[in-house]
């Protein structure tokens, strides 16, 4: 086992051992066993990794199709990109316009970090971000590292980076925390920290922690407040049992979620068609899903914008053919009703 001993100016503080490499490798079969057993315990059609590896991706869901679509979008706006958070809208707008197969789901991430940065921010920004990280790794020379604690940090960060070439782990809080902790451990300034005055560093650290706690506290409060709109009445907090949408106004972090609730809960009429159309036109950038698209089409029809309604209906039929048929038949297009 590798021994880790953390020291301070007064001597050793803690000493512990990492498991032997062979012991860690022996856990790999346990992972695959869990990947096979857990979906069967959970039930409900959960797809297991074993099934995915043996049968491949469902039709229209493969990474190759997804990346081919993203490359087409990058080619249209290579320098500045489509804008941060605009990939799902760009994918919807290209319904039926790709030269080959189309990824069938709402595409809000490229499932590859360099491609995602390129499609939303442009190729120069993607090269700058990825190049800076590569420069950081080369300058740090992890292959020369001998401290087991820092080696472990390099290994964890490396796994997240590799995962980012197929998925989007950095869009999830737990991965963000681990990645940030690894950067904190490996950051070059830590080596020179002992040579700097400690008082100023403590003040800055305390201030940063205070600000972070305040931000997390506000985000938690705002999330609880806004989430009441999406809960059944019996599950809401007492204050929000009635008219939760009216009490959810003024959110900084979840304004789009409030507008989405307003759009989906407000019946469309001739008198509010213009307001609904403006709201739907904005929210199609946030979440181009059937409920938003239907409100966009129907409000355009009520306003006499027949060409726009026809264009959106054509996109709808390609992007969500099943929900489009349900809409034509007068049925609900809620994804849960598919």
Image (cartoon, rainbow, N blue to C red):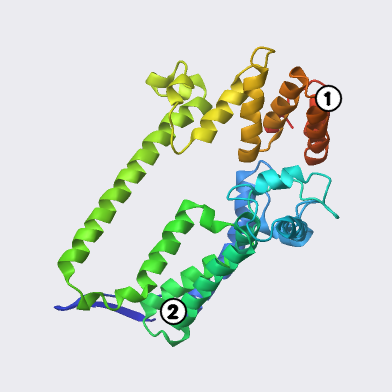
Q: Nearer the viewer, residue 294 or 119?
A: 119
Do the residues bearing badges 2 and 1 touch, measured as CB atoms within 8 Å? no
Position of 286 relative to 25 (above/below): above
Quadrant, the C terminus: top right
**Is residue 167 at least partly visible in the picture?**
no
96, above or below 278, in the image: below
Is residue 275 rendered to the left or right of residue 99? Answer: left
Q: List the single residue furthest toward the right.
A: 99
Position of the N terminus by quadrant: bottom left
Tell me, for residue 20, which label it has, or none: 2
Q: Earlier in the sequence, mark 2 or mark 1?
A: 2
- x, y percent for residue 226: 46, 30
Report the disc number at residue 245: none
**Residue 41 horizontal/vertical position (percent):** 61, 47
Residue 207 percent coordinates (x, y): 24, 54
Q: Position of residue 279 (x, y in %)?
A: 61, 28
Left or right: where does residue 80 sit relative to residue 241? right
Towards the viewer: 135 or 305: 305
Q: CA distance from mark 2 to mark 1?
A: 62 Å
Residue beneath the point at 74% across and 19% down? 303
Mark nearest the camera among 2 and 1 is 1
Question: From the viewer's perspective, is residue 109 above or below residue 19?
Answer: above
């Amino acid at each position: 086992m590798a021994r880790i001993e953390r020291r301070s100016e007064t001597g050793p503080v803690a000493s512990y051992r990492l498991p032997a490499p062979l012991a860690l490798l022996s856990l790999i079969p346990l992972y695959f066993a869990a990947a096979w057993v857990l979906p069967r315990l959970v039930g409900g059609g959960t797809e297991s990794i074993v099934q995915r590896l043996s049968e491949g991706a469902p039709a229209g869901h493969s990474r190759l199709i997804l990346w081919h679509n993203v490359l087409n979008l990058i080619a249209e706006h290579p320098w500045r990109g489509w804008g941060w958070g605009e990939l799902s809208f760009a994918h919807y707008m290209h319904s039926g316009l790709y030269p080959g197969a189309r990824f069938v789901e709402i595409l809000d991430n490229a499932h590859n970090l360099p491609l995602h940065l390129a499609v939303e921010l442009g190729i120069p920004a993607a090269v700058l971000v990825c190049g800076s990280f590569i420069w950081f790794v080369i300058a740090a020379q992890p292959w020369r590292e001998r401290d087991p604690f820092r080696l472990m940090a390099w290994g964890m960060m490396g796994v997240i980076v590799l995962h980012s070439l197929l998925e989007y782990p950095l869009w999830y809080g737990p991965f963000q925390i681990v990645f940030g902790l690894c950067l904190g451990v490996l950051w070059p300034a830590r080596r020179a920290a002992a040579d700097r005055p400690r008082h100023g560093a403590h003040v800055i650290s305390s201030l940063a922690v205070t600000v972070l706690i305040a931000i997390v506290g506000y985000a938690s409060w705002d999330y609880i407040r806004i989430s009441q709109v999406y809960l059944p009445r019996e599950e809401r907090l007492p204050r929000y049992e009635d008219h939760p949408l009216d009490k959810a106004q003024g959110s900084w972090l979840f304004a789009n979620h409030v507008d989405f609730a307003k759009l989906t809960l407000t019946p469309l009429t001739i008198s509010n068609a213009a307001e609904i159309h403006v709201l739907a036109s904005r929210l199609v950038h946030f979440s181009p899903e059937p409920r938003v698209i239907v409100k966009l089409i129907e409000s355009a029809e009520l306003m006499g914008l027949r060409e726009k309604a026809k264009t959106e209906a054509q996109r709808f039929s390609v992007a969500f053919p099943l929900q489009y048929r349900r809409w034509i038949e007068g049925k609900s297009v809620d994804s849960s009703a598919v």
